Amino acid sequence: MSDIKPIVILKFGGTSVSNLERWKQILTIVNLRLNQGFSVVIVHSAKSGITNLLEMFAATQDKTLVKEINDSIQALSNELKISFDNESTIEQLLSFSERKILSAYDVAKILSFGETMTNNVAFAFLSQYLKVEQLNPKEIFISRADDDRSQESRILSAKCSIKSATLNQDCAIMPGFIASDSDGNTIVLGRGGSDTSAAYLAVALNAKRIEIWTDVHGIFSANPHVVPTARLIEKIGYEEAREIAASGGKVLHPRCILPAEQNNIPLHIYNSKDMEATGTVIQKGYESTSPRVRAINVRHKITLVSMDSMNMWHQAGFMGKIFTVFEKLGLSVDIVVTAQTNVTISLDTTDNIINDEILENLKNTLMVFCDVTIYKNCSAVTLVGYRMRALLGVIAPIISNFAEQRIYLTSQSSNDLNTSIVVDEDQADKLLIALHDGLIAENANQYGFGATWEELINKQTNKQHIPESWWQTSRDELLELAQAQSPCYVYDQKTIIQQIVLLKSLTSVDKIFFAMKSNPNRDVLKIIYQQGVGLETVSPGEIKRIEETIDNLKQDNVLFTPNFAAIQEYEEAFAKGFHVTIDNKFILEQYPDVFKGQSILVRLDPGHGSGHHRYVRTAGEQSKFGIHHSELQDLKAFCDANDIIVKGLHAHAGSGILEHQNWQRIIQYLTDQIAIFQDVEIINMGGGYGITENPHEQGLNMQKLDEIILSFKNKYSNIQFWMEPGRFLVANAGILLAKVTQTKVKGNSGYIGLETGMNSLIRPALYGSWHNIVNLTRLDEAVEITATVVGPICETGDILGVDRKLPMTKAGDIFLIANSGAYGYAMASRYNLREPAQEIFIDS
């Protein structure tokens, strides 16, 4: 470079580098910064989805995944219209499939290919428009010699020293995530490590600032998918931001802030989908100056180690002995709480590679000194702010409402910046919502807070052309119907058929069963069955409903999948000739005569859950569903001994999943078990196919899903592939209409009350689910107020939507709650002896 220019580091995540449109956007940002007089360095992640595939390959060494990885990268290079030779990388990947055991270095090398392949494609693309150079992170980031963690952590979640670097061009590009050890071996910085790469490089180049370009607006006061009213934090100091990142805030990797802080380099976070938005700025001078809570985060998958011994009371050196054990095992301790005869610590997966073998080794070693109890799958709810001890009197009453739940420990940080409460996973989100409502929502006008997530999303949506929903084109008819029959659910036949047609476009799927628990309406069941879709049932009541509703019901079109049901229910299903799924070895062992000579499907636990809320994640150690992998060999032996044929394997990870790779993992796990259950002829990949809750969201990529299933179908040509959609078929087809009863508006905010509430639609109260809510009467009028929409039930939780932008509303207006066709009326109640909304089916 001829002139010394200030340097800006632009970091882009996986979705931001995955197609031509996003790379054009990157070019726009780069040119903008160049024109502002900066030299620019791009740091990027791997193309979206590639790292997941590489992780699966490292776990399974399945060669078919290599083809999928190559196809994905080639698709990107084709879209960017560049020639790209990936042959040597693919040969290296295939060579790893031949190794019996992969070392941590092997895994790091495999994972690094995502960034290196993406970098080569990106460099070729950018070179068409700019003079650009490639930087090699392995020459700049070298693993630290003083890192005392386990070898696996040092290789797969590395901490690095930074060498100085210089630029030869005004524009450069470098892959994130990758580093080197002192011997030149490839190591990686862990999930989300590209943020840290950007911070490290900013230090190496003495950059003016770091810009993190992502798909969110910045750091929020809570996870907005759990708390839609979470506030954007527009300005914050380094120390508080570091605490937020370390306590579960997922916008930034926890390690990326400290290098920036130590070198006084500002960090800016921007939304690449909303470039005009403010974002978050982290820099010196934006610290809090009075007691306040900035953010509340949740970290799941926390492991607690509780150590009890009378010998620790007044025993000099006892703590040193037990912490030496953690040091020797390379385990980094997070929270520490002590009592006279107990020490409890937490281990966080952010800094530790934790598995059953490591925990067993830890327990056995510690038991020389004390009794040890390990609690897995806990959650830490952490409040981050300034002078937190001064707020304990406000925090305590909120926590006291959870007195009946198990609180494992509470911890106050020595720097007075955070307070943590460790609870069971299923209580964490409830506690988060209660704390946020009491500590942040009521003090939202404090310095540094911006708009809510909902407000930003609504603003973003207004900029886009969104196709009209069926209820918008039917507005006049719906208003007329509601005047006479509200509150009411309305189901649109045409939309249901459209969703069925969409699923039937999946050429890889042999049979579809509708999970009727989502909507057992008789008219809905009839139209779905008429379209050639089978019915999945979970109770005798549901079986009775379909027998009364469906003419000429065929046995092969009914699937019975109960959970913890009485044995009589299984007997009746077998007698009717339906497909029956078992999800507990106990029921077979207790009643072998009932199952003798039968062919069954078996529901397995794939070991992980997915979905839009923890309550709908139906797999993993904290779920009651499915048979654990450790029981499969015994299950097979029992079935063989009792003439029971396992004809199908089934798994269901959760609900509302928009990531098509979820089914790659599910099907991979199920097909792996064919080695045990060799009579299998059916793979039932379950349901959980997500719908878009907000108009601006991208839905499930059906083409990618079809490609995934086809890749397995080609390998297992004698296997039928089934699916069990529920919400996917009916959610968008249903709406809830209700009249406004009262309003309580002061200025431009307040409450709007409807004639029905959680007795008709409990999902917002139960799951914190988000439904689009509009004033159908005044659909075309300008929004003037921000209101919380509530029902008439005598419960604080009877809330349908919080802080919704709405026109000025009057009693008698008709409100519409969208995407209510699934788990709406099906979960309704007569609480307070109020009748729920009736159901109306539009036959189009």
Image: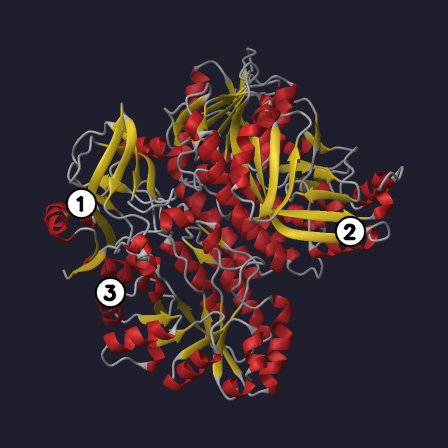
User: Which residue occupies the foreground of this view, 792 or 468?
Assistant: 792
Task: Give the percent coordinates (x, y) of residue 628.
Answer: 59, 66
Q: Which residue is mark 2?
A: 362
Dot 2 crowding, Cα within 10 Å, few <14, some 14–19, many 20+: some
User: Which residue occupies the foreground of this view, 655 or 665?
Assistant: 655
* Disc 2 secondary structure class: helix
Q: Which residue is mark 1?
A: 472
Dot 1 crowding, Cα within 10 Å, few <14, some 14–19, many 20+: few
Relative vertical location of residue 171 with respect to residue 453 in this rendering, above or below: above
Task: Give the percent coordinates (x, y) of residue 304.
Answer: 68, 47
Image point 45% across, 81% down: which residue? 568
Q: Residue furthest right?
A: 316
Residue contact at pointers 2 and 3, CB within 8 angstroms: no
Task: Give the percent coordinates (x, y) of residue 635.
Answer: 60, 76
Image point 38% across, 42% down: which residue? 796
Image point 59% across, 35% down: which residue? 247
Q: Which residue is mark 3?
A: 524
Cα–Cα gap, marks 2 and 3:
55 Å
User: Which residue occupies the foreground of this view, 504 or 445?
Assistant: 445
Q: Note whether residue 91 is visible.
A: yes
Q: Residue furthest top?
A: 3
Cα–Cα gap, marks 2 and 1:
60 Å
Looking at the picture, which amino acid does disc 1 mark? Answer: Gln
Disc nearer the start of the sequence (2/3):
2
Q: Note whether residue 47 is visible.
A: no
| Side of 414 relative to 56 (left or right) | right
| Side of 783 relative to 147 (left or right) | left
User: Which residue occupies the foreground of this view, 824 or 234?
Assistant: 824
Looking at the picture, which amino acid does disc 3 mark? Answer: Val
Task: Give the percent coordinates (x, y) of residue 269.
Answer: 48, 27
Q: Quadrant of the N terminus?
A: top right
